[in-house]
Amino acid sequence: MSSTIQISIAKPEDALELLHIYTYYILHTAITCECHLPSVEDFYTRIQQTLVAYPYLIIKQKDEILGFAYTSPFNKREACQWAVETSIYLKPNLQQRGLGTLLYEKIEQISRAQNITYLNACLTYTDQEDKRLPKTSYYFHLHRGFKQVAHFHDHAYKFHDWYDIIWMEKMIATPTTPPTPFIPFNKLDPTVIDAILMSK
């Protein structure tokens, strides 16, 4: 990792800057199925609520936030607590430079520390990519070891067009019986989190 690149835990106060990054994806792409801009207050709350149980990370160069990634419940039912959904967004001009890989490496390490067994990614998809939906995210997840496990046709309507939805998964730990208890992010040893974020 470049000495000028740092990964740290997001703060709710980062909401305005993170929303600025996310706004591009809402208004100009089908990468997110969200169609209307949330308020800064809503985004503040999203970050705050996520950090109770899951990591929410930012990647910075000097004082500029370049992107963010977080996990959330794959399914909110108790029996599914060992699987999470991943999300990642970078400034659009900074893709394919290794920043997403750096973020996902930290997300995976923290998820293992939480005793998560599976990471899952929900992606909009089209066989013939267009300007609103390139296959960048699909190939990124393939490169990170995710495998496609589900394909739903014409499930997302945005910009007067239909898009498919696919799910991809990655096993990061072998499930045990009984499972090792899930550790919420706010219950993890801070020294463990710091060691992960500072490691190369």
Image (cartoon, rainbow, N blue to C red):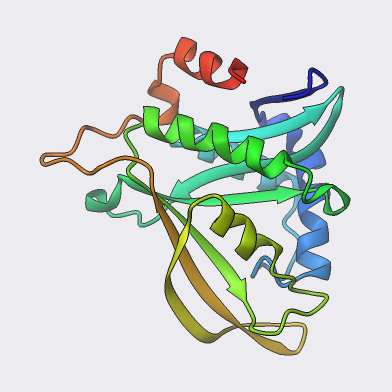
Residue drawn at point x = 52 percent, y = 33 percent: 51
* Res. 117 image quadrant: top left
Residue drawn at point x = 35 percent, y = 54 percent: 76
Q: Is residue 36 above or below residue 91?
A: below
Q: Is residue 8 above or below residue 161?
A: above
Q: Is residue 123 above or below residue 42?
A: below
Image spot of residue 7 (x, y percent)? 68, 26
Q: The C terminus is located in which quarter?
A: top right
Work out whether residue 13 or residue 4 is closer to the camera in this orientation and state it.
4
Image spot of residue 156 (x, y percent)? 60, 81
Residue drawn at point x = 75 percent, y = 33 percent: 14
Q: The N terminus is located in which quarter?
A: top right
Q: Residue furthest top?
A: 191
Work out whether residue 148 or residue 73 is closer to the camera in this orientation and state it.
148
Work out whether residue 119 or residue 189 is closer to the camera in this orientation and state it.
119
The answer to whether residue 128 shows anywhere in this view is yes
Work out whether residue 13 or residue 199 is closer to the camera in this orientation and state it.
199
Please give left or right for residue 77 compared with residue 9 in the image: left
Image spot of residue 74 (x, y percent)? 40, 55
Image spot of residue 104 (x, y percent)? 58, 40
Please tell me how many numbered marks the rendered image carries: 0
The answer to whether residue 45 shows anywhere in this view is no
Q: Is residue 36 above or below residue 73?
A: below
Please give left or right for residue 83 compared with residue 42 in the image: left
Residue drawn at point x = 48 percent, y = 13 percent: 190
* Res. 186 image quadrant: top left
